[in-house]
Amino acid sequence: MSHDVVKTEPIEGQKPGTSGLRKKTRVFMEPHYLENYVQAIFDGTGGVAGKTLVVGGDGRYFNDRAIQVILRMAAAGGAARCIVGQRGLLSTPAASNLIRKRAADGGLILSASHNPGGPDADFGLKYNGPNGGPASEGVTAKIFEHTKTISEYTILSAHDVDLGSLGESTLGEMTVEIVDPVADYAALMEQLFDFDAIAKLFAGGFTMCFDAMHAVTGPYATAILEDRLGAAKGSVRNGMPSPDFGGGHPDPNPIWAKELMDTMYGPDAPDFGAASDGDGDRNMIVGRGAYVTPSDSLALLAAQAHLAPGYKDGLAGVARSMPTSGAVDRVAESLGIDCYETPTGWKFFGNLLDAGKVTLCGEESAGTGSDHVREKDGLWAVLLWLNILAATGKSVKDLMAELWEAHGRCYYSRHDYEDVEADKAGAMIDRLRGMLADLPGQAFAGLAVEWADEFAYDDPVDHSRSEGQGLRIGFAGGGRAVFRLSGTGTVGATIRLYLESLETDPGKLQLDPEEMLAPINAAALAISDLKAMTGRDKPDVIT
Ligand code: G1P
Ligand code: ZN
């Protein structure tokens, strides 16, 4: 078999500090585009000679073709072994686990997360390092440099590898090992959770509905929830991964998982509902008639994690992203453990997890996880919830009511203004930044501002500083509004406005969040002048 050296030109690649490259699928399919990026990853990480890599993705359109290219390029680069999920499938947390378990040098994960898939939708590729987590800022910077200077790549001329058959084969000098994508992940879950107690719960008639949203968690959820734990057949919905996610938007929130919400608020609602996203790292939790915000879910899991065998000794600490509500802070305080506030993005948790400072972490955007891998993990969160439900025998609704009675309720909502003209969004943020220092003491829409700042983070482990991480405004009474621009949107700019207010009055713990947050929303809009500055009079998505 021969190695071809192909002349090529630089591409517009992954920006440093972003986890992976996301583009329209057709861009990835352009001649040499994928190849250039893969070569830049290899070169930016010191070459692949002699290395072991984990390769897999969420099954979206182009997943299989891209994996064939990656394998031929890894072989041409002298890699010793590629461990590949059968049929090219690996959820993001399962890939993170495999990298760690097999002590691989890194992994290539093909996914655009919760973005739609298909020839006219989105594709993505990211590199994870030997700890199983997203590449550090330093590594992504090196990869980025290579995308700008690349002039050639090497690829083996060879037939396609059969991704369907388990076992080893060779591609040039490289071993290709096709593994069951579920087996190692399921074994890890079995170590962490009391599978017998959960199985008993199902055997006792407990019902659930897991919506895999036609994405990668289908096979994982079916194998673990139905086959292993005995949930009734059909508990997993939309469980066959499809290249375009059934034409849907595999983002587990009340908007995109509406079918599940309707079931859980309908007359025949099961006891427990959950969903996960395209690549299986996000989760949504909903009880019978009781949606749980991701911020509240993190707080509940922190309060009750000790009920699961993997966390029986308690938590070292917890971490949340800055826009996530302060609900978990209150739980951490009562447990007497540290709570870290990090910028948005999972990579900031990696150092804290590696250093053993935190055990659990999460984001308001439906990401929850622990030190078991270095990615957020959708099904893990579902299983921890199930373990807690089994151990307490209580309903989701009751568990949440008890949490709020003990700690107060952080009413919370995120308002997204999508596809705003980038210069208008930037101008609004710049104006607000300029006003921050003068805000305290002033009142807007009847609410007094107590403090305001721009969030910056000093990493307690590597001592790096990240600035410009969101504008925060604190109001009298403990409410908060945060403005930040999305770093993952693909069209125009997305302004995220995060609203939060703490309620400790026992008579006001079961009210409508949007109504409770209306005064803070009005004040935030008055301060930012968002409507006039962007021409938008209401958010596109409320989650
Ligand atoms: C969004 C979420 C953030 C998450 C990221 C990747 O980023 O808000 O919490 O880590 O997707 O899944 P954003 O678009 O807000 O920059
Ligand atoms: Zn995801």
Image: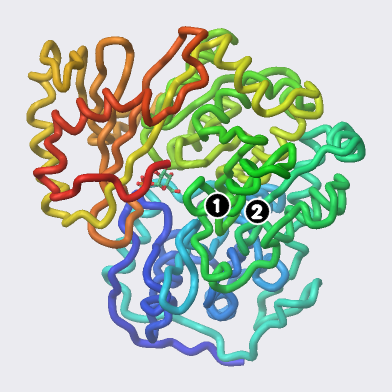
**Dot 2: what SS?**
strand
Q: Amino acid at mark 2?
A: Asp
Residue 315, compared with residue 334, is above or below; it is below
Location of residue 98 in the rendering, given as x and y in whole percent from the top left corner: 68, 53
Q: Position of residue 349 (x, y in %)?
A: 48, 35
Report the residue at 33% width, 13% height from top: 478
Residue drawn where x is 60% and y is 59% of the image: 213
524, 338: nearer the viewer: 524
| Label 1 sits on residue | 257
**Colour mapping:** rainbow
Q: Which mark is residue 211?
A: 2
Residue nearest the viewer, comparing 147 with 392: 392
Give the quadrant of the N terminus: bottom right
| Left or right: 87 in relation to 258 | right
- Alpha-carbon span between mark 1 and mark 2: 8 Å
Q: Secondary structure at mark 1?
A: loop
Figure check: 450 above or below 278:
above
For residue 55, what is the image quadrant?
bottom right
Name above or below for residue 310 compared with residue 22.
above
